[in-house]
Image (cartoon, grey):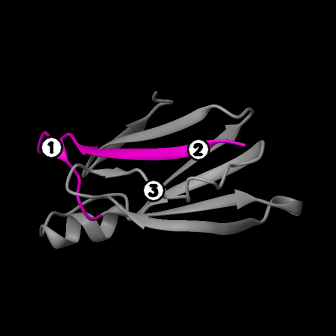
Amino acid sequence: MSHLTTHVLDTSQGKPAQGITVILHQEIIDGNWEEMAKGETNEDGRIMDLLPEDKKLKPGNYRLTFLTGDYFSKSDIKGFYPSVPVVFTITDEEHYHVPLLLNPYGYSTYRGS
């Protein structure tokens, strides 16, 4: 069980990426995924309330899908990735922060704090 947050930085502009829709899925039986939550990054590129405070994640595999194509289209920027899926494993009750560093032709992610 864990609390989950995310943050997106647009490295091509050197600023937070506002308005990116992010969908959280949990892997269920037979490798299928079930949607758990959906949110949008704020003016600081963050989603701090993707899950309610009392909602904790159980150990297992999860996927955050960042809908990056819409974000770049709104700015009339041609990008290569229409979405960025980030799959990770929750193993304990700690806080999990999954940031995304993004530009039109690349991205990276890591376990944040």
Q: Amino acid at mark 2?
A: His
First in residue order: circle 3 vs circle 2: 2
Which residue occupies 78% across, 42% down?
59
In the image, taking residue 76 as reference, residue 57 lies left or right, namely right
- Height in image: 100 above or below 75? above
**Residue 104: image x %, image y %?**
24, 52
Q: Which residue is mark 1?
A: 15
Where are the magenta residues, as a range?
A: 1-19
Q: Which residue is mark 2?
A: 3
- Height in image: 70 above or below 58? below
Please identify, in this view, whether the residue under mark 2 or under mark 1 is nearer the observer.
2
Closer-to-camera residue (69/93): 93
The picture quadrant where one finds residue 78 is: bottom left
**Residue 79: image x %, image y %?**
26, 59
In the image, taking residue 109 as reference, residue 75 lies left or right, namely left
**Residue 110: image x %, image y %?**
47, 31
Which residue occupies 32% across, 63% down?
20
- Classify mark 2: helix, strand or loop: strand
First in residue order: circle 2 vs circle 1: 2
Q: Amino acid at mark 3?
A: Asp
Which residue occupies 26% across, 43% down?
9
